[in-house]
Amino acid sequence: MNRAHQPKCRFKGYCLWPALFLLALAGCAAVGPDYSVPDMTVPAAWNTAAVGGLATGENDSAVLARWWETIDDPILTALIRKAASQNLDVKQALAGIRKARAQRMGSRADRFPAVDATGSIRKSGTDTGESELYSTGFDASWEIDIFGGVRRSVEASQADLEASREKLNDVMVSLLAEVAVSYIDLRTDQARLAVVEARVAAQQQTFELVDAAYRAGSGDALAAEQARTSLQSARAEIPDLKTSLEASLNSLAVLTGQAPGSLHSQLSTIAPLPDVAVELAVGVPADTLRRRPDIRKAERTLAAETARVGVATADLYPKFTLSGSIGLEALRLDELVQSASRTWRIGPSVSWAVFDAGAVRSRIEIQSAVQEQALLSYEAAVLGALEEVENALVAYAREQEKYRLLQAAAQSARSAAQLAGQQYEAGMVGFSTVLDAQRALLSFESQQVQSRGKRLSDLVRIYKALGGGWAFAGSSAS
């Protein structure tokens, strides 16, 4: 053993005491506010009465998770599966999760020492000669997280990751509901178009009969023109319906990650509008707020911004770093691996921003304001969710009532049209009475189809408002 190095060894223990002291301090509480979930007062029950297909009682979580199965339409189910896997918003949300996961890993890495490998060959010289120095080794540094800035950063990145997962869930809830509503709009417009085309065919026949009678000299010119007007008016509804049909087809294509026009061949064939009669248990507001991913996302965002107040506050305090190195140094390359060439150093260091013109405190104030904004966003999300559910419940219950009234009105209009035709043939009424009855029948039949579609769309909106429909996101967000 080379005794020339023994005196250095006696100080190794003394060098460790400051490091151990710093490590002990690192276990202290982190600076900044400790997060807790905000306590908001919510109603014990919904304001809307449980009527018109609504019922009190606990939500069936299995039904909410896959609510589209209650509609029992294989084409809709296939579209929803396609959208869940191919929609671009879903893919963006998944990329956001990967980003947040990587950022969390990066923030966790700050809790551990950083080690660098070094090596150099330096050659120097004077008038009397030249010399060389060979060195190699490892340098390590570790910022001791005494005041918890790194811990708060990890806390923030973890909350960001959880918020990104909830964003994916929220995207899925909205996406699947939008697919269903677009599909229902498509089938509703197809049904309305069928009603209008049937009435156009009937009015075309009526016009031909009246016009033929007029040309033969036994009819009325006014009646012929009225029949022509009624026919053209009915025909004028067709272009708007076809435009709406195209929009629904293109919307479904884009929602499923395809170019507009991709679904025309599959969905252009008219299919009946699904008819669903369910008694929906609406649960209580507190359960809905816990289930909705948009509220959970807002809460996790608030948690992240609260932790970042601690990150900013930690800059007020000194930073302690434990650094050291071990290596080899020699004047000749063949002596580099000998024990006498070994070198080492270890010791703590401290840095503290003594003067920064208030920059740190400004950053703390900025982050505190950002935290307050996040809190207000969370509260707004809660109130918005309550409003959305209440509006959806009212719309569904009232549409049920409207549909029943339109059914009765359409039946009466059908009877009136038949009577008007019979009385016209008997000479008891003028032809305008027949046209008025036919127009009323067309209007009520079209409104009945619209109401049937809206009733189904309102049911979908209730499922969305209650936070159902993100089952497909579960496996991808883990």
Image (cartoon, helix red, strand yellow):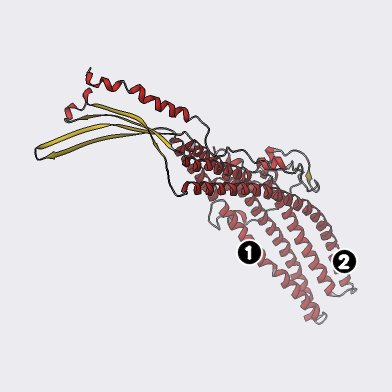
Q: Which of the 4 image quadrants contains residue 444?
A: bottom right
Which residue corresponds to mark 1?
243
- Residue 78 in sight in this render: no
Residue lying at 66% horizontally and 56% vertically, measured from the top left: 186
Residue at 65% over, 41% down: 38
Q: Nearer the viewer, residue 176 or 114?
A: 114
Q: Which secondary structure lies at badge 2? A: helix
Q: Which residue is mark 2?
A: 419
Q: Position of residue 27 (x, y in %)?
A: 49, 29
Of the 4 image quadrants, the one containing the C terminus is: top right
Q: Residue furthest left?
A: 128
Instruction: Name the disc covering residue 114, or none.
Output: none
**Spot occupied by residue 366 in the image (x, y as percentages of width and height):** 53, 49
Which residue type does callout 2 highlight? Leu
Is residue 441 rendered to the left or right of residue 170?
right
Earlier sequence position, callout 1 versus callout 2: 1
Image point 63% across, 39% down: which residue?
A: 37
